[in-house]
Amino acid sequence: MLTLSPLGPPPQNGNLTNTPHLSYYMDHYAHRHINTSSDSELLLNLLADHLQKTGKFRIDADDIFRAVREVMQTTSGAYACAGMIAGFGIIGFRDPNGIRPMGWARRKSDKVEGGYDYMMASESVVCDALGFTDWKDVNPGETIIITKDKGVQIQQAVPARTFAPDMFEFVYFARPDSVIDGISVYRSRMAMGEALAHNAAKVLKQHGIVADVVIPVPDTSRTAALELAQTMGIPYREGFIKNRYIGRTFIMPGQEVRRKNVRRKLNTMALEFAGKNVLIVDDSIVRGTTSKEIIQMARDAGAKKVIMASCAPPVRYPNVYGIDMPNRFELVGHGRTEEEICETIGADLIIYQTLDDLVQSCTKFNPEITQFDCSVFTGEYVTGGIDEAYLAGIESLRADNAKIKANKANGMTTVQAGVTQGSGSVLASGPMDGSSGNGTTFGAEGEAPAIGLDNEEAGAVEHADTAVGLSNLGEK
């Protein structure tokens, strides 16, 4: 990625949703060439453009705060960004809805007496592993600047809008030993298991079924499954052994590829299934590919009945804020009732967590957060501006990307043309995990033409490995 100013690309977690408007502005007003389809490059150029307007050879913290504020006023979507400015320090900022997680921590420096090292990350577990303490979340719409001479400077760039962290972080993506926005991921999953147990007990009684054993789908659902088993008084067993060298199957391209890798990823221990009514617990059911194969594997191992329990409600809509989920028509929950989903995946019975129970499983640990982004369950997107044309655009883009990945897997080369989204081109690429960047920044005050959504409407974009550190800083 290149900019007309020497600003290194910031690690970005999330996804911008008004990229056509932003790319038009970059081309017609800022006169900056965008080389890739990544929204990270777009965000980088937008920040560099605002910085360049200062006309200064050396920028200061006020210039950066002002530039980030202007970026947030013109972008929509979800993002948590961190970056390094050579000779100045590190910066970080989070979208006004706080959809994607972000925080920072410090540790005593072993090179500067009385000084501290600082680190920014999406999840606290990264800082824990490297000896950083005093973890603090970056608030929605907040900017943090850490420099050698002034230490930590924090400013609210724009007023926080509806604080709505992504619920799927707690359900699936985040490490259980992380704490996000004051909520322990581990404890929230325990609460999910307890709530699901009460619902499962009612449903099983209604259908006259007695479960003999509770078996989790490794690894994410283990915490909830154990709590469910203890609450219901049913034995907990590890019936699936995971191959740790197979990645997440739900983001793999192609149905056949996903199906084969489920079998390669998991192996059953037949003695835990034979002749039993098995209650299988999973964190969620997305495409249904994994669930269908797992249920068939349980039957092949001799299970008498297979009951599928999900810690999350039916996933019926795509995620547009940085989680690479399939389009609506690939989701097993889209347009189907729970009974139809059960029939599709081949279970004897399916039990879903209710949305209210799911939300309460998290809010009980931080009552200050009253709302979460649950768009994959409800189709209600907190930033607004997500219509049928937008969803059709990203579905078309993801379908093309899936074809490219499948072709590469088969040794074929594909050239992709532009994909139309609504009235413009789709530039957003989805999440950018594990990226890092550094460089020098020049350039931002001044009024830019209004683009995207206004302050009332615009939201402003994964993960434990997305982090930027700055060492040897003296505490002021």
Image: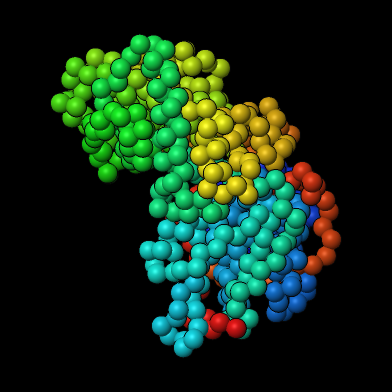
The x and y percentages for residue 108 are 45, 79
As rendered, which of 60 and 335 lies closer to the eye? 335
The x and y percentages for residue 259 are 33, 26
Q: Quadrant of the N terminus?
A: bottom right
As rendered, which of 466 and 192 lies closer to the eye? 192
* Side (left or right) of 133 relative to 270: right
* Side (left or right) of 409 relative to 192: left
Q: How many marks?
A: 0
The x and y percentages for residue 423 are 74, 34
Q: Residue at x 45, y 24 (%)?
A: 199
Q: Residue at x 75, y 57 (%)?
A: 158
Q: Is residue 107 above or below residue 246?
A: below
As rendered, which of 348 and 343 lies closer to the eye? 348
Tell me the quarter of the picture where residue 157 sits.
Answer: bottom right
Q: Residue at x 65, y 73 (%)?
A: 153
As rendered, which of 126 and 202 lies closer to the eye? 202
Q: Residue furthest left?
A: 271
Q: Is residue 46 above or below residue 363?
A: below
The x and y percentages for residue 232 are 34, 28
